[in-house]
Amino acid sequence: MTSEGTKGAVGENEIRVHFTREAGDGIKAGQPSLYWHPNMRIAEPQTAYLFYFSNISRSVPRWRNRAYQLSYWFNYLVARGVAWQDASTDDLLHFRDAMQVAISDQTGRELCDGTVAQRMIAVIDYYEWAEREAGYRGSLIAEFTQHSQAPSRPRDEDALAHTGGGTHMRRRLSKLIP
């Protein structure tokens, strides 16, 4: 398997989460990484994203949640035979729909909308990062960002200019995320 792909090579069947126990060499205690099981090969772009995420958030529980949220997505792609770079909005919609009828291992009930939303937000954030930092040029994020519009008023007259506009994108995401 290449470090960029999600389709596992022989013996790489799923992505699993690992947490560093002790800090050292720029790694924080509790910092997550994703790896291919059973070969134990690091999932490089995904783990690079988690390293980035751990630098913008100081909360170890948030790191853990984000790692698991992404592992669900990448394992979903593996099960469907889709490389992460080739995932489309349709894949994300199917993922959302599958989660809305999935049963939680913890509660034995269907996942709540908040859980589904957090997983989808994690996926979208990963692809936004990958577009900036990992050379991702696929369609998943482009479909949301190509119609984003700057505020129609001059920035000095717009009380919400600090939010960067993108009202259309937020509306599209709100329809996608429960």
Image: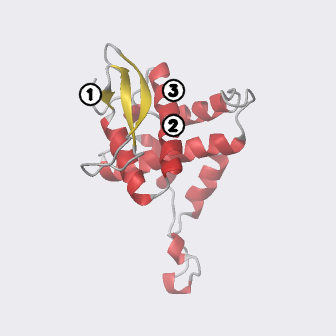
Give the residue at x 62% y 35%.
96
> Vertically, is 158 above or below 49?
below
Mark in the foreground, 3 or 2: 2
Tell me the CA gap for discs 1 and 3. Answer: 18 Å
N-terminal label among 1 and 3:
1
Q: Residue at x 69, y 26 (%)?
A: 103
| Residue type, mark 1 in image | Thr
Residue 15: horizontal and vertical position, in percent? 42, 27
Residue type (three-letter) at the residue carrying disc 2: Tyr
Find residue 68 and report its horizontal and vertical position in percent: 51, 37
Q: Secondary structure at mark 3?
A: helix
Way the structure is coloured: secondary structure
Location of mark 1 (residue): 2
Identify the mark nearer the N-term, 1 or 2: 1
Q: Which image quarter holds the N terminus?
A: top left
Q: Quadrant of residue 120?
A: top right
Q: Amino acid at mark 3?
A: Tyr
The image shows residue 156 at horizontal and vertical percentages of: 51, 86
Label 1–label 2 contact, CB within 8 A: no
**Among all residues in the image, which is located at the extreme right?**
109
Tag of residue 68: 2
Which part of the image, by quadrant, shows the C terminus? top right
Vertical position of residue 175 compared to residue 70: above or below: below
Residue at image coords 64%, 31%:
99
Pointer 3 local density, CA inside 10 Å: few below 14, some 14–19, many at least 20: many
Tag of residue 76: 3
Q: Is residue 13 left or right of residue 122?
A: left
Q: Is residue 42 left or right of residue 176?
A: left
